[in-house]
Amino acid sequence: MRETPSQEQLLDYFASHVSPQKVNMYRMWGVDFIPGRREGVRVWDYDGNRSWIDCRSAGGVFNLGHRPPRIIAALKEALDSIDMSDHMLASGYRGLLAKRLADLTPGDLQYTTFGSSGGEAIDFALKLARGYTGRPGVVSAEKGYHGHTGLALAATDEFGSKFGPLAPGFRRVPFGDFQALEGAVTDDVAAVIMETIPATAGFPMPPDDWYPSIRKLCDERGVIMILDEVQAGLGRTGRLWAYEEWGIYPDIMVCGKGMSAAIYPVSTATYRKHLQSFFDDNAFAHLSSTGGSELGCVTSLAMLDQITEPGFLEHVRDMGQRFEDGFASLQEKHPAVLKGLNRRGLMMGVVMSRDECGMLMARALAKRGVIAVYAHYNPNILQVMPPLIIKPEEVDEVLDAMDGAMADVGNSLG
Ligand SMILES: Cc1ncc(COP(=O)(O)O)c(C=O)c1O
C-alpha cells in the first residue's frame, strides 16, 4: 500500500519538485499549508486542524464556492454517458452553451469559441481582431493583466518584460485616460482590450464616460473592442456582466475562471455576429483540443443556471453592501491603515495607507483564518473576492478578522 505522506512531507515535495520559491512565499504569508477538505467559502488544511475563509476565490474560479454541490452533481451525471468529445466535430453541448451565452448577453453577441484557460481565450480574441481587421495594433491598459500566454502576455503590463521580444504592435495607456487612448488608436490598430474592472491594479473604477467613449471611438475607427470579464463577469459585480453598468457591450467578451465553476476548466470568447465572416475562408483557423470539452460545457451550463436564478445577483449586491458598511466602520476605527474601498458587488479593493500594508494585512489575515492577497501593481490595495455564495454571518466573520488584522498592521506601522 502506498504510504500516506504528512502535510510537512507534501509541502516538502512541492518545494523540491514544483517551486521552492513559492513555498518560501507561502511561509512568509502564513499560508504554508496543503489544502485538504474544502467546502463552500472554507478551505481546511490537510490535517483538518486549521481552516480559512477564502477571500481570494482564485480571482473568481470559486464564485460558487468550493465543491459546489449542483455542479458536482451535474458532472457526476455527465460522466455516466459522455466524455470530452472531439473538438473538430460538431457538439451538442458546445452548441447549447454557446446559445445560452448568446441569450444571456446583450446586442448581437452571438458566437462563442472555447478554450481551457483565460489566457487562451484572450489570445483567440486578439487573433480574431487581427484576422478580421487585417491590422496588427493592440491598445491595452497600463497595470492591465490578461494572462501569460502569447498575445495575452503582450497585452499584459510588466510580466512579459523578461521574455522578450514579445509579439509586436502592442501599446499601453493609463486606465481611464481617454485622451491618451484616443491618441494611441492609430490607423494600424485592430483592437482595444481592457479588463472591465482591472483586478491586478486593485479594482479602480473608470470615469463614467470611459466605456461609452471607447465604444464610440471603436465604432468610428473600425476597431474591435474586447472586454476581459475573466474576473469581473459572471455575477461578481452584482450584475451578470460588469460592462452592463456603462450601458455598452463589447465586440468580443472573454470569460474564464468562474466559467469552470471550480470543477472543470472552460474559457470562452463570445463575439458579435459580423466577426464570424473571418472564418468564411477557413472554418478551422483556430483550434483547441481540450477547449470546450463537453464535460466542461455541462458544468458551465449548470453554473449559468445557478447564477441566473432569481435572487442570486441580489444576494451578491446585499453581501457587497454589508461589506461596505463594515469597512466604513473599520475606517473610523483604523484611520491610519484603512483609506477607502473600491467596490462593485463582491469585487472589492481595500485601499490602505502604505504599500507595505498589503503583505502585512495578508499575513495578519492568514493568522486570523482569512485568505486574501494584495494587488500586484498596487500593493497598498488588498483584493477581497469571497465566493458569491457567502452568507451574512460569514461576511461578519471576515470583517472581524479584518478588524483584528488592521489593529496588528496599525501597531507594526507604529
Ligand atoms: C483579468 C484576467 N484575464 C485573464 C486571465 C488569465 O486567465 P488564466 O490564468 O486562466 O489563463 C486572468 C488570470 O488571472 C485574469 O485575472
Image (cartoon, rainbow, N blue to C red):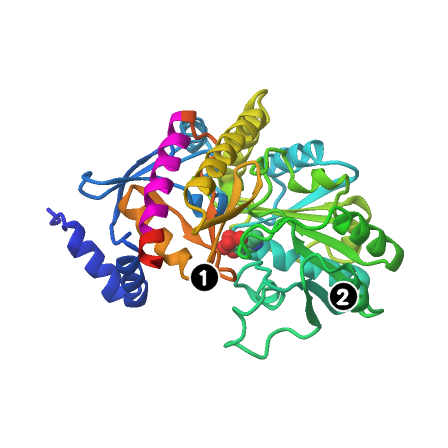
Disc 1: which residue: 355
Q: CA distance from mark 2 to mark 1?
A: 27 Å
The amino acid on which the numbered mark 1 sits, given as a three-letter code, is Asp
Residue 358 can be seen, yes or no: yes
Q: Nearer the viewer, residue 180 or 2?
A: 180
Question: Could you say where residue 173 lies in the image, as x and y percent from the top left?
Answer: 69, 66
Q: Quadrant of residue 175?
A: bottom right
**In the displayed structure, does residue 308 sit left or right of residue 66?**
right
Residue 66 can be seen, yes or no: no
Q: Nearer the viewer, residue 171 or 330?
A: 330
**In the displayed structure, does residue 87 sit left or right of residue 67?**
right
SS for dot 1: loop
Q: Nearer the viewer, residue 296 or 225?
A: 225
Residue drawn at x 50%, y 77% is 162
Residue 272 highlighted magenta (yes or no): no
Q: Where is the C terminus found, in terms of image quarters?
A: bottom left
Q: Quadrant of residue 391?
A: top left
**In the displayed structure, does residue 112 sit left or right of residue 409?**
right
Disc 2: which residue: 180
